[in-house]
Amino acid sequence: MKKIVMYVLILVIITFIIPFFFTKVKVESNSLIIQTVESNEENKEPNDNSNVDTTPYNYKEYNTIKLLHTKTNTIEELPLDEYLYGVVSAEMPADFDIEALKAQSIVARTYTIYKILANQSKHGEAHICDDSKCCQAWITKEDRLARWDEDKRESNWNKIVFAVNETKGKIITYEGKPINAFFHSNSGGATEAPVDVWGGSGYPYLQTVQTAGEEGYTQYSSEAEFSREEFVSKIKEKYSDFSINFDEENCIQIIEYTSGGRIKTIKIGNHNLSGVEVRTILGLKSANFSVEIGEKVRFKVTGYGHGVGMSQTGADSLAKQGYNCEDIIKHFYIGVEIVSY
Ligand SMILES: [Zn+2]
């Protein structure tokens, strides 16, 4: 009898429990890849600010948030600050300056509150999701610790917790309303107006600003190259009538730049494309690029991300120049206040 119970137990472990662990680990490591690659990114349309009912804004009301785990499609309710530990630690390297981490905490809190207030039922019952391509990245403490070197785990985690706690309740407002606090990895030296990324208007606090010191980070420059055939076939996926004669001078020609120095319009063969479109089609790290045609079509890319709002490496660079977290925020978002609730 005992033997039978043992066999059943082993069978249960093999068929259910072990595969469960493997699936979990696999899913989470995938999600981390997405999280660390892009920040507060891409195919998001900005929400219309006017829909945001923010009066009276009571921070205590948002003490807990409902987070959608996109991989498992489950909703978890957790305290806001605890959620923010997972966001800040997923979105910004822990070795960045403490003032940059504090700025990131305020930005992430603002972004979250804005999402709650602007809730367009995008995620049903949940306020926000853990996908950086949709809302903002989030990671569990357990996973976060596992990805740091053992001797850094405790100090890194404490630094993140300190950044969030030190800024407790603080959010960024414009004319008394929480802002849509976009952020990205590296501006390449100048941030971008949202109109040049998504079109539309209505964000007076999001304008082009210059930041010194961005070039010192690995996110600043990258390259991508494509064989001529590959290049043509990628564009053809979007424009089936696309054609280009590489022997023609000016077969690729930049027509116009944005206020932030990215490509606004570029003529490629028989089509005019926006820089953002080219970025999406070819998977470039930003819309700030130059093109060279040789055997291959080669792109030199500056900066990382859509370029709107706070640049994370810019925040770190400013912190190292002596800016505190509020100075950093006011550098990237024009005419805003930082309020405490
Ligand atoms: Zn989302």
Image (spheres, rainbow, N blue to C red):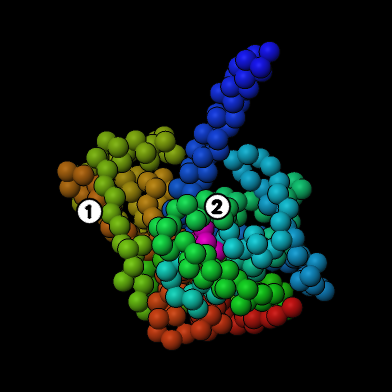
Q: Residue 145: x and y, percent?
A: 49, 56
Q: Nearer the viewer, residue 143 or 64?
A: 143
Q: Nearer the viewer, residue 55 or 203?
A: 55
In the image as oriented, which residue stretches furthest toward the front? 2
Question: Which residue, given by chain and number where applicable, does mark 2 sit on?
Answer: 142
Q: Residue 215: x and y, percent?
A: 32, 71
- In this picture, is 71 found above or below 32? above
Characterize the local packing of mark 2: few (<14), some (14-19) or many (20 or more) Cα atoms within 10 angstroms. few
Q: Residue drawn 62% across and 63% down?
A: 84
Q: Is any part of residue 233 visible from this angle? A: yes
Q: Amino acid at mark 2?
A: Glu
Residue 292 circle label:
1
The mark closer to the camera, 1 or 2, is: 2
Horizontal relation, residue 303 to residue 175: left or right: left
In the image as oriented, which residue stretches furthest toward the right? 56
Q: Nearer the viewer, residue 249 or 116?
A: 116
